[in-house]
Image (cartoon, rainbow, N blue to C red):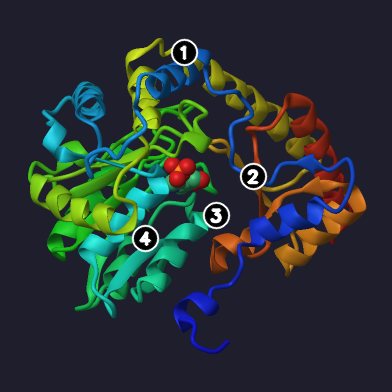
Amino acid sequence: MANLSPSVVNQPRSGIRRIMELSQTISNVLHLEVGEPLFHTPAHIVEAACLALNQGATKYTPNAGIMPLREAIAKKASKDLNIKILSDNVLVGVGGVQVINSAIRVCCEPGDEVLIPDPSWPNYQMMAVIANVRPVSYSLKFENNYQPDFDELEKLTSKRTRLIIVNSPSNPLGVVFSDKTMQEFVDFSKRHNIRLLSDEAYEKLVFDSKHVSPLPMDPDRQVISAYTFSKTYAMTGFRVGYAITDVQTIEQMKKIQEAYVSSVPGAMQMAAVSALEGPQDCVAQMRSVYEKHRRLAADILDNHNIKFFLPNGAFYMWIYANVKDSTQFAEKLVIENRVAVAPGSTFGKNGEGYIRISLASEKEVVQEGVKRLAQVIASQKT
Ligand code: PLP
């Protein structure tokens, strides 16, 4: 294509979007492909946004976010992590996606390298490539329980490596890293003098253990942790996320904010304040529904002898489809069985042969969708 940036033009289209678009041409599809909570945003959060708009929150806001939100985040993070986080350590952005992009931009020059888990959320790779930063994949494998291999990471590190991305709880795997593993990531990043970007979008969605953030393991705040209101409070459309790191890095990220988005809508930030300061039982209620759906899906898959990874966090299930081409499999499944799933290859080379389903759909959809999926996988077993 003439006069367009090759790093954008050469980006493959999202495999999940392709399935979504295909499914829109077919009636009565059971949707398990999208990573979005089934719940409405809690009413008190919506009301806070409406009130803020009515009271005049209709203007630009400061690059790093409004002070009441930065302070509420600092208070929440200090309590959760048992360390002192100040509002100056906080930058509010347009969803987790935008603060992650800012973190990549602030750490990397074109030609630098970023270590990205494979499989992982496809946006990391896309953001790196569009910034002309080279994504270097490190493997997470079923046979290792999706734990990192630090010997492999050593080999993948070069003079151009500037950043390693860690995602726990993980999309698409649902793996949750322990204190020990997180400490190893921090030690690794310090040994090589590279920054660690910890994507903690699903921090509040952990089932059997606890969420571990690397922030307290790094007194210099060289870790950049990224969070979002999207998943915890079912606020995907509000587009509010935030980063926590050292003050100097936040100062530089403010410039990126100015260049790309200027600021996050003020009313959405006020809604985020109300999410943090309001009742938290909605979070536990949503988590318990995802956990029930996890059990439901696991039982159906077990009954069909299908290999899958039992997630300990987030709201996805990673299932072995026993196929060579997961995109073709997902397309056929939506056309012939009316079940939409995300093809594993979208999440990286190691994802080929797998598919991801979302547990954040209605119970009946999960039940019937997983049943149809399991029957198809079981029927093609050799
Ligand atoms: N990180 C991960 C791993 C995600 O799966 C997502 C969304 O799907 C995000 C970050 C960002 O979400 P948002 O931009 O809605 O905050």
Q: Is residue 335 left or right of residue 349?
A: right
Q: Which mark is residue 142?
A: 3
Ligand 1 lies under 8 Å from the Cβ of mark 4: no
The label nearer to you, 1 versus 2, is: 1
Q: Is residue 159 left or right of residue 315?
A: left
Mark 2 residue type: Val
- Mark 3–mark 2 distance (CA, rounded to whole Å): 23 Å
The residue that mark 4 highlights is: 149
**How far from the left and from the top, in percent, is residue 56?**
35, 24
Crowding at label 4, few (<14), some or many (≥20) Cα neighbours within 10 Å?
A: few
- Mark 4–mark 2 distance (CA, rounded to whole Å): 29 Å
Which residue does the image show at 90% across and 45% down from the upper left? 27
Q: Which mark is residue 44?
A: 1
State which tag comes first along the sequence, 3 or 1.
1
**How far from the left and from the top, in percent, is residue 150?**
31, 61
- Confirm whether residue 92 shows in the render: yes
Q: In which quadrant of the rendered view does residue 345 lie?
A: bottom right
The residue that mark 2 highlights is: 34
- Residue contact at pointers 3 and 2, CB within 8 angstroms: no
- Mark 3–mark 1 distance (CA, rounded to whole Å): 41 Å
State which tag comes first along the sequence, 1 or 2.
2
State which tag comes first along the sequence, 4 or 3.
3
Mark 3 residue type: Phe
The furthest residue to the bottom = 2
Mark 4 residue type: Asp
